[in-house]
Image: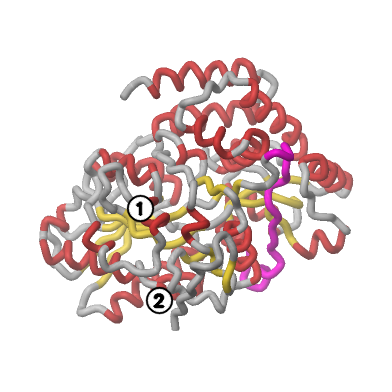
Amino acid sequence: MAHAYDRSDLPGSVAGHRMSRRSLLRGAALGAGAVTLPALLTACGSGPGGDGKTITLGSNASDPVPKKAFAEAFQAYADQSDGRKVKVNTVDHNTFQENINRYLQGKPDDVFMWFAGNRMQFFAKKGLLHDISDNWQSYTGFSDALKDQSTGEDGKQYLTPYYYYPWAVFHRKSLFAERGYQTPKTLDEYVALAKQMKKDELEPIAFCDKDGWPAMGTFDYINMRTNGYEFHKSLMAGEEAWTDKRVREVFDTWRRLLPYCQPGANGRTWQEAATSLQKREAGMTVLGLPHPGAQFPKGEQADLDFFPFPAINPEHGQDAVEAPIDGFLLAKKSKNLKNEKTLESAKDLLKWLATGKAEDIYLKSDPNNIAVSDEADISQYSALQKKAVDLVSGAKQISQFLDRDTRPDFSSTVMIPAIQKFISSPNDVDGLVNGIERQKKTIFASD
């Protein structure tokens, strides 16, 4: 049974380990981030108009844990609906992201999974998303701030949010206990711990960037810890120069950490990095909650723990937390949605997914995310989920992630190759930031 909590008198705090969404999302930067677009995804629609009862859904949940959890949620919807069913088209997560633009302009599924904020706004502005403002009139359990993250520049709603997850530094409790490792709160303590892990013949930091986005989380945290959230927001908006000494300091600090990171990161997937943590080959890793969680077997998940990314500049401390929000949208160019009955069915699915019950079903099988609905039942949350709720609710600022906080073309064509170049050749920071700034000026002047 779903539980609602009245937290109007608890700004920025936790009641029953449920955060205030208004507090959680207040001040969060809206991000854009699309990606390179080499080919179309293949939709699985049943032809123009569909049959009115079958809803096709494009899924990026290709890993076993979320794939199973979504299958259970969609089956639960079908079981309680009047003959409706969801036909899922699952595509590898990174392939989905890399092809999303052409997919939405081609022959998309009726419903698809995507991200809140400017990453959603980008496609709404291009006319590729279906307006679901009428659905939002009946939604309950979502804060105004969460609604803002689901709203386009035209004031209409396009996304039904489903869950969020924080980024942090993950590790194994048992490993820390066995070795006597202490949780670092500052960068110097973090480096000292990494040095000790190296002496203990561990890879201190499991590190990866083959997928193009994982290392962005480390950049964001070093930037926000060094220069603060407002600078992060302005930098992502193209309002600050990448040649600024503050940006150079970010890369210089990161260069200090690279000797303690797994070598060959540009050839390693996030799954491989998370698995090295699970196998005790590495001591720590900077990822989002679902990433290491999905690689830990059920019997070992209680051993997974995290701490906030360490403080660098005392002025900013550990104020900011990255906590991206994912959800569901309707594709404007779906031929099936031209059929009013299919459109009604697709909107009905979104209404159901907006309920606490729907989130409860999903999270029962995937405890690596946090529900967005205030009506979700959090009584069964794991200790790790409760800690994640506390982390985000205690944050002074929330970011969405580099590739969600900036323009899609800048993220994909400039920042992915720039960060990968830095990882492989970290000594030419001047050349790196000059190249980023030159391309940034061209891209941000293109509107």
Position of 362 compared to 313: left or right?
left
Q: Is residue 203 above or below residue 313?
A: below
Which of the numbered marks, if any, corresponds to residue 64?
Answer: none
Quadrant for residue 146, please give it.
Answer: bottom left
Position of 16 compared to 102: left or right? right
Q: Residues within 10 Å of mark 2 (few under 14, many from 20)?
A: many
Q: Is residue 248 above or below residue 23?
A: above
- Which x, y percent locates residue 56? 25, 61
Quarter of the picture holding the N terminus: bottom left
Q: Residue at horizontal 57%, vertical 30%?
A: 419
* SS of the residue under disc 2: helix
**Residue shown at 67% from the left, 41% from the top:** 316
What range of the chain is rendered magenta? 296-315
Of residues 285 and 397, the one drawn nearer to the viewer in this rendering: 397
Residue 381 vertical placement versus 1 (above, below)? above
Indicate how the structure is coloured in the image.
secondary structure
Query: Which badge, 1 or 2, comes first in the chain's sequence?
Result: 1
Tell me the kind of residue under disc 1: Ser
Q: Which residue is mark 1?
A: 150
Amino acid type, residue under disc 2 in the picture: Lys
Circle 1 Cα neighbour tier, 10 Å, few/some/many (<14 / 14–19 / ≥20): many
- Quadrant containing the C terminus in the rendered view: top left
Task: Give me the disc on residue 357.
Answer: 2
Which is more toward the observer, 84 or 46?
Answer: 84
Distance from Cα at disc 1 to Cα at disc 2: 20 Å
